[in-house]
Image (tube, coloured by chain):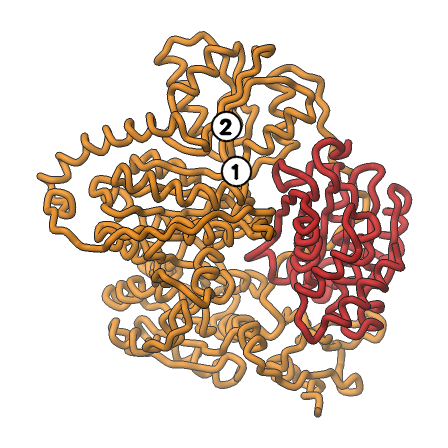
């Protein structure tokens, strides 16, 4: 029987966790990392514990606790999630672990679904932790058990950094054996390791610096770092992670023979780097984002006094922003080694294409909430927002800022305290509120910020693929648990104006927003309506709506609302509703002429 | 430039979030694995899925990265006409475009912010430069039994050019779509294949 499967990179990573005998897996959803836990949580038979935690710092500490108790643990998040978890990260480095711990932080070069393109390898250097940077989904799967092994051997947590093209790439993956060996869990009281008071921390720092160098030596023989010297060539390429497969293809397309060093495990092994530097006259370093590898290579050349020309980002040959691809690598190789340029020019299109940005779904309740918010707070109102589907409310003109998770409420407070005159109404989703919005609300109430906080509760963590959260009454694996009440949390945080509204009911929601706007102090409006995608999946189907052409005046009020189910027919000069309609009925309330009605079944 | 010697067949699948581009690449990818070929694919997930423009790269018989270089794809499978144009730069000069002629208007167009090019002009533009197979896959999907089988119509159309067996493709469709829709999807595949 064949054991090759066509697998998503994140599913392959989940498989790697199973093969390596992971025991405790926690995480917070974030594209492109979410499907790792989605996959593990959906399994019918599990011999491990898996949870969606409320934020990355929490998830990190859950995994850290498990690892110091002796388990093999994993925490998953997207790159910016590691910022939230950076506090425990920097000190867990000193503490180390007893079992093993893998910190999966998925990077997103080119910001396909992110607010920045930071490079997790920098964090690994900063925290003095090894870092694994897979180049294919197969390698990602195979690396996980090896990362557990290394983490356990050196009693140090290890970072694992897939990028979007690994996590959301698909490939044929050869499955491996599942280990049956499970380390025994027993928390041992070791004060000098588990209590990072100054006396202990001071002693651990030089120890960890030494461990980092020991790991560098260990990685000299790692299968993830491969050196191929070309006896007939004085040219060389050093490349990391997914960029290494682009670089190899680019070399082949350029027809160039060169020595090649692939680095997918950090810290960079000195022996392999010096070997290639001594062999070549000119070396090009190709990696995505930050010059992590390039800087190390330059330092090693200088340290060993090797006379070799090194090129990369500092010469502007390899971009420091955006994801790489074969074309970019071919340009870099041609320029660095002075080859005739062979890469293709982009086709010049003389037809104008309509923009097709992602939008809120047809019938999404966020659109209705934004519509009313905008009506009540006006065009001069200030609308800080947050990270989630509702960021797409930018098309409704009701999103003015997006910084990071939870920053809507806190930025609103700052804008208010700066003395801004116009009313401030921010938006944040249910999961983001649980993540880091709660502290912001507490701070706003405590420091008397006169702002309105809209919590858009669509009963799920939608944007990342519909993960459960504490408001829903079920865990990652579908077990029933307490459904935490957002309004009770808001009251407990000190908010005195807390009201809930169904955003599909425009009049009632308008009334709530008006009173919230006029309230002196921090007011909270919870707009509650389940996500339309989730609702449809659970089998709920409402009657669609249609436009009565006799009554439609062609005023476009419904079309301007921006629902993809509403269109304007230029020929008949009437609005019409297409088959994407979910039956929310909001456009019928917007129409002043009663032209939109429910289709009777 | 093509991917000769690097990849057996480079395919770009373009469309709109919700049209089923991922299922289309899954069917082809699974078939390739079943046939013992290495496959590398890249997909659009997350933010870009909400009705946005989506593109998948699928490289059959390739052991490099998943991203197809510009002007290297053997075929462009476009589930929507304007999306064919958006990703046309990936197609090699002697490549083929298989395009569904039924547009999906973006909100920027329905709300009057931008205009949608004439579908006839899009096809003319493509035909002046490439081999083109243009047909209304939505109509064919309805004929097969359900509008949602449009992606399988398109898989059927490209299947003639893929280095993969028709029978294994149909077997993989059988395993990839909901049980109730197997017959519809196989019919959709056959109707699409007739267009190629």
Q: Residue at x 84, y 63 (%)?
A: B190
Pick whichever, B58 or A187, lies toward us.
A187
From this view, report whether residue A328 is shown above or below residue A41: above
Q: Position of residue A143 (x, y in %)?
A: 44, 41
Q: Which residue is mark 1?
A: A135
Q: Which chain is orange?
A: A
Decide if residue A166 is on the left or right side of residue A448.
Answer: right
Q: Earlier in the sequence, mark 2 or mark 1?
A: 1
Q: Which chain is indicated by disc 2?
A: A
Q: Which residue is mark 2?
A: A262
- Element type at marker 1? loop
Q: Quadrant of residue A273?
A: top left
Pick whichever, A228 or A200, lies toward us.
A228
Chain B: its colour in the image is red
From this view, report whether residue A516 is shown above or below residue A379: below
Q: Which chain is indicated by disc 1?
A: A
Mark 1 and mark 2 in contact (Cβ < 8 Å)?
A: yes
Q: Residue at x 88, y 41 (%)?
A: B129
Q: Residues within 10 Å of mark 2 (few under 14, many from 20)?
A: many
Pick whichever, A508 or B154, lies toward us.
B154
- Element type at marker 2? strand
Q: Residues within 10 Å of mark 1 (few under 14, many from 20)?
A: many
């Amino acid at each position: 029987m064949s054991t090759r499967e066509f697998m998503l990179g994140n599913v392959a990573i989940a498989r790697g966790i199973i093969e390596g005998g992971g025991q405790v897996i926690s995480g917070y959803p974030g594209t492109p990392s979410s499907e790792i836990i989605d996959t593990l949580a959906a399994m019918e038979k599990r011999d491990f514990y898996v949870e969606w935690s409320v934020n990355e710092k929490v998830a990190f500490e859950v995994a850290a606790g498990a690892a110091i108790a002796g388990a093999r643990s994993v925490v998953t998040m997207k790159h910016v999630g590691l910022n939230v978890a950076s506090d425990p990260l920097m000190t867990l480095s000193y503490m180390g672990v007893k079992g093993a711990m893998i910190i999966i932080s998925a990077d997103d070069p080119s910001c396909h679904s992110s607010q920045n393109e930071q490079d997790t390898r920098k964090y690994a250097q900063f925290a003095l932790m090894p870092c694994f940077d897979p180049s294919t989904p197969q390698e990602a799967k195979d690396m996980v058990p090896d990362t557990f092994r290394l983490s356990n051997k050196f009693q140090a947590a290890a970072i694992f950094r897939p990028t979007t093209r690994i996590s959301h790439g698909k490939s044929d993956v050869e499955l491996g054996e599942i280990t049956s060996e499970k380390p025994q869990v027993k928390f041992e009281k070791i004060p000098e390791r588990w209590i990072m008071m100054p006396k202990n921390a001071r002693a651990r720092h030089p120890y960890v610096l030494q461990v980092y160098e020991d790991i560098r030596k260990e990685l000299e023989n790692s299968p993830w770092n491969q050196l191929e010297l070309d006896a007939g060539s004085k040219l060389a390429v050093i490349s990391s992670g997914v960029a290494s497969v682009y670089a190899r293809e680019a070399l082949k397309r350029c027809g160039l023979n060169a020595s090649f060093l692939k680095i997918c495990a950090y810290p960079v092994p000195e022996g392999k780097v010096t070997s290639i530097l001594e062999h070549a006259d000119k070396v090009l370093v190709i990696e995505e984002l930050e010059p992590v590898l390039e800087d190390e290579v330059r330092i090693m050349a200088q340290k060993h006094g090797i006379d070799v020309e090194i090129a990369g980002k500092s010469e502007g040959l390899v971009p420091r922003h955006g994801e790489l691809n074969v074309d970019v690598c071919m340009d870099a190789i041609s320029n660095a080694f002075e080859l005739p340029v062979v890469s293709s020019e982009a086709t010049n299109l003389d037809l104008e294409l309509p923009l097709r940005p992602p939008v809120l779904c047809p019938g999404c309740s966020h659109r209705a909430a934004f519509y009313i918010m905008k009506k009540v707070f006006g065009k001069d109102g200030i609308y800080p927002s947050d990270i989630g589907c509702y960021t797409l409310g930018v098309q409704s003109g009701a999103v003015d800022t997006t910084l990071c998770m939870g920053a809507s409420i806190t930025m609103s407070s700052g804008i208010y305290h700066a003395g801004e005159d116009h009313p401030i109404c921010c938006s944040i989703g249910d999961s983001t509120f649980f993540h880091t919005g709660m502290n912001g609300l507490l701070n706003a109430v405590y420091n008397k910020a006169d702002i309105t906080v809209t919590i858009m509760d669509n009963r799920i963590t939608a944007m990342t693929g519909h993960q459960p959260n504490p408001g829903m009454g079920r865990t990652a694996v579908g077990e029933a648990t307490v459904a935490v009440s957002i309004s009770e949390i808001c009251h407990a945080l000190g908010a005195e104006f807390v009201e809930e509204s169904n955003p599909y009911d425009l009049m009632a929601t308008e009334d709530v927003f008006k009173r919230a706007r006029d309230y002196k102090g921090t007011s909270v409006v919870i707009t509650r309506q389940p996500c339309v995608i989730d609702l449809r999946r659970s089998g709920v189907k409402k009657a669609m709506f249609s436009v009565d052409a006799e009554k439609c005046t062609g005023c476009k009020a419904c079309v301007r609302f921006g629902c993809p189910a509403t269109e304007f027919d230029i020929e008949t000069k009437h609005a019409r509703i297409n088959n994407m309609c979910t039956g929310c009925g909001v456009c019928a309330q917007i129409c002043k002429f009663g032209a939109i009605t429910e289709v009777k079944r | 430039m093509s991917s000769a010697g690097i990849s057996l067949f480079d395919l770009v699948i373009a469309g709109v979030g919700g049209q089923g581009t991922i299922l289309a690449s899954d069917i082809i990818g699974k078939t390739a694995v079943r046939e013992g070929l290495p496959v590398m694919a890249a997909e659009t997930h997350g933010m870009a899925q909400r009705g946005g423009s989506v593109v998948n790269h699928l490289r059959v018989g390739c052991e490099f990265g998943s991203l197809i270089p510009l002007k290297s794809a053997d075929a462009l499978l476009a589930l929507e006409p304007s999306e064919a144009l958006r990703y046309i730069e990936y197609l090699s000069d002697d490549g083929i475009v298989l395009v569904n002629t039924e547009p999906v208007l973006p909100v920027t167009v329905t709300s009057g912010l931008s205009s949608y090019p004439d579908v006839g002009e899009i096809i003319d533009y493509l035909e002046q430069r490439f081999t083109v197979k243009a047909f209304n896959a939505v109509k064919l999907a309805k004929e097969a039994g359900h509008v949602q089988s449009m992606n399988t119509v398109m898989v059927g159309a490209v299947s003639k050019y893929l280095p993969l067996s028709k029978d294994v493709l149909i077997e993989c469709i059988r395993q990839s779509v909901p049980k109730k829709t197997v017959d519809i999807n196989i019919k959709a595949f056959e109707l699409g294949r007739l267009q190629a």
